[in-house]
Image (cartoon, rainbow, N blue to C red):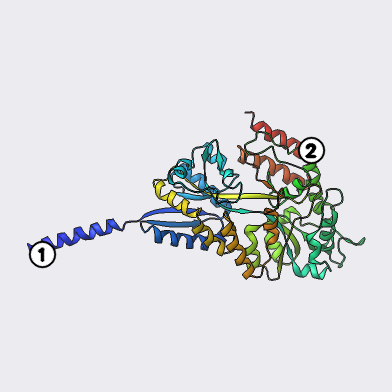
């Protein structure tokens, strides 16, 4: 009898102990595999402070990420917390798929003035807040140092280069000089054969769709183009002559001059792979790719400031954030994790990995130290971010999915040589603006 009682007591104590240490598991999605180690370290630190919560981090590639997310919203399998993008969140917010965290921020007295200017506001609309800032990025020109040296081009040349849509300025001359045909002639030679190129001076990541963050936005805005009149505007200016002449100049680099890899080849092979193969000298890319180029190129890589256009030197300033799914059954735990992700504790950890520039200054300082330790000068990205008037925001509006679809078709047709920029962009702009009048 005593033994039965003893077993019962032991079982009850064990059950209570198990209950006391029961963990609530939340799932966090991100799309960049380079960032996963940093965020796993953040999760470890978070779980040390919150032993009752376990964070399961899941990484998916870009396309699978958004497909899985939108499918998950419907099927009830979306993650509790996920990295969000400015092109996506307006649609998620209007569909009631992400939590308005403004009341939680107010309840817990979360400081929101610790972030880089403008980042927090990007994620708010009408008094509601749909995420806490995660990181930011700008664009620079990534270049192969050996190919520049072989062509007799000083890296100092890249600090003051200029661009215009008429003759391309010194930017186009550098691209031409870095391009070679099978006979060894570069693009500046009168004997250059654009039909038989063995080394290209330039490549872009594709046609760039409606936003062209790395592909064309930095050129177009430096030429006086603007997407619209600000966040949540209902009118785009894709029919601007400033945009048309920019896109036509860029398309003609491959269609007529042979200096840039054809878009059809980029779709098949990928711009990053073409660059790291050593067959392309330069490409424009974002600060989130610094470590990737360092790890994957078998030659020394440099990062140059964007060229100075007629309206100055310009880069898109894009900011990501972490959002909570409204269907999560663990929203209080999810909110704790989001707060930690946006805190100096996690942001400094992320910075120390040197993969992205976190949303707060101390995290950026940690990132700069990490890059310096790796022997990389990444000032091309931070200089433009810290220069007044040198950046412009990602155009946040409704109907981003439809806009991307319309503009991708238009841009593809131009870069494939099937339409003139002025005609295709005028037609596409009418379709885009019609979305806001439905």
Asked whether, in this view, residue 362 is left or right of residue 431, the answer is left
Question: Relative to residue 374, is residue 201 drawn left or right?
Answer: right
In the figure, is residue 201 to the left or right of 405? right
- Circle nearer the viewer, 2 or 1: 1
Quarter of the image holding residue 432? Answer: top right
The residue at the point 81 percent across, 57 percent down is: 161
Residue at 76 percent across and 42 percent down: it is: 225
Tell me residue 350's x, y (percent).
54, 60
Q: Give whichever of 213, 315 is nearer the camera.
A: 315
Within the image, what quadrant is residue 400 found in? Answer: top right
- Answer with mark 2 or mark 1, whichever residue precedes in sequence: 1
Instruction: Give the residue drawn at x 65%, y 67%.
Output: 294
Q: Residue furthest top?
A: 438
Label 1 element class: helix
Q: Position of residue 312 (x, y in %)?
A: 78, 49
Q: Nearer the viewer, residue 141 or 63?
A: 141
Q: To which residue does mark 1 refer? A: 3
Label drawn at residue 423: 2
Whether residue 258 appears in this view of the structure is: no
Mark 2, other Cα within 10 Å: few <14 / some 14–19 / many ≥20: few
Q: Position of residue 347 (x, y in %)?
A: 53, 58
Residue toward you, 131 or 344: 344
Residue 16 sits in quarter:
bottom left
Q: Is residue 263 visible?
A: yes
Alpha-carbon neighbours of circle 1 within 10 Å: few (<14), some, or many (≥20)?
few
**Residue 387 at what x, y percent from top left?**
70, 52
User: Which of the pair 51/282 is nearer the observer?
Assistant: 51
Q: Could you tell me if the residues under marks 2 and 1 are in contact, i.e. CB atoms within 8 Å?
A: no
Label 2 to label 1, Cα distance in Å?
Answer: 89 Å
């Amino acid at each position: 009898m005593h033994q039965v009682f003893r077993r019962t007591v032991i079982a009850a104590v064990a059950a209570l102990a198990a209950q006391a240490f029961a963990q609530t598991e939340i799932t966090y999605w991100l799309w960049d595999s380079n960032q996963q180690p940093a965020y796993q370290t953040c999760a470890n630190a978070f779980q040390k402070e919150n032993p009752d919560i376990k964070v399961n981090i899941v990484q998916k590639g870009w396309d699978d990420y958004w497909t899985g997310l939108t499918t998950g919203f419907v099927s009830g399998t979306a993650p509790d917390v996920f990295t969000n993008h400015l092109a996506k969140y307006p649609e998620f917010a209007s569909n009631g798929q992400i939590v308005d965290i403004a009341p939680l921020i107010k309840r817990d007295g979360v400081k929101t003035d610790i972030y880089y200017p403008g980042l927090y506001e990007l994620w708010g609309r009408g008094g509601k807040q749909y995420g806490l800032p995660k990181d930011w990025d700008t664009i620079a020109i990534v270049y192969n140092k050996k190919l520049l040296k072989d062509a007799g081009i000083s890296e100092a040349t890249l600090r003051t280069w200029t661009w215009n849509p008429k003759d391309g300025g010194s930017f186009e001359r550098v691209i031409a000089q870095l391009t070679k045909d099978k006979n060894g002639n570069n693009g500046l030679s009168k004997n250059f054969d654009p039909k038989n190129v063995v080394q290209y001076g330039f490549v872009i990541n594709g046609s760039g769709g409606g936003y062209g963050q790395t592909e064309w936005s930095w050129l177009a805005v430096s030429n006086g183009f603007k997407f619209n009149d600000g966040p949540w505007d209902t009118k785009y200016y894709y029919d601007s002559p400033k945009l048309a002449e920019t896109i036509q100049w860029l398309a003609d680099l491959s269609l007529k001059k042979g200096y840039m890899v054809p878009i059809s080849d980029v779709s098949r092979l990928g711009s990053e792979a073409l660059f790291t193969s050593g067959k392309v000298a330069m490409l424009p890319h974002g600060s989130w790719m610094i470590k990737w180029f360092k790890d994957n190129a078998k030659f020394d890589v440099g990062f140059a400031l964007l060229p100075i256009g007629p309206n100055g030197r310009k880069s898109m300033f894009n900011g990501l954030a972490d959002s909570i799914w409204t269907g999560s059954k663990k929203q209080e735990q999810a909110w704790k994790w989001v707060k930690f992700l946006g805190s100096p504790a996690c942001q400094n950890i992320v910075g120390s990995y040197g993969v992205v520039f976190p949303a707060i200054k101390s995290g950026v300082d940690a990132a700069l130290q990490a890059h310096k330790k790796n022997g990389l000068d990444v000032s091309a990205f931070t200089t433009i971010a810290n220069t007044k008037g040198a950046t412009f925001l990602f155009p946040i509006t409704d109907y981003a999915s439809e806009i991307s679809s319309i503009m991708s078709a238009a841009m593809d047709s131009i870069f494939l040589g099937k339409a003139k920029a002025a005609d295709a962009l005028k037609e596409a702009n009418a379709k885009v603006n019609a979305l806001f009048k439905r």
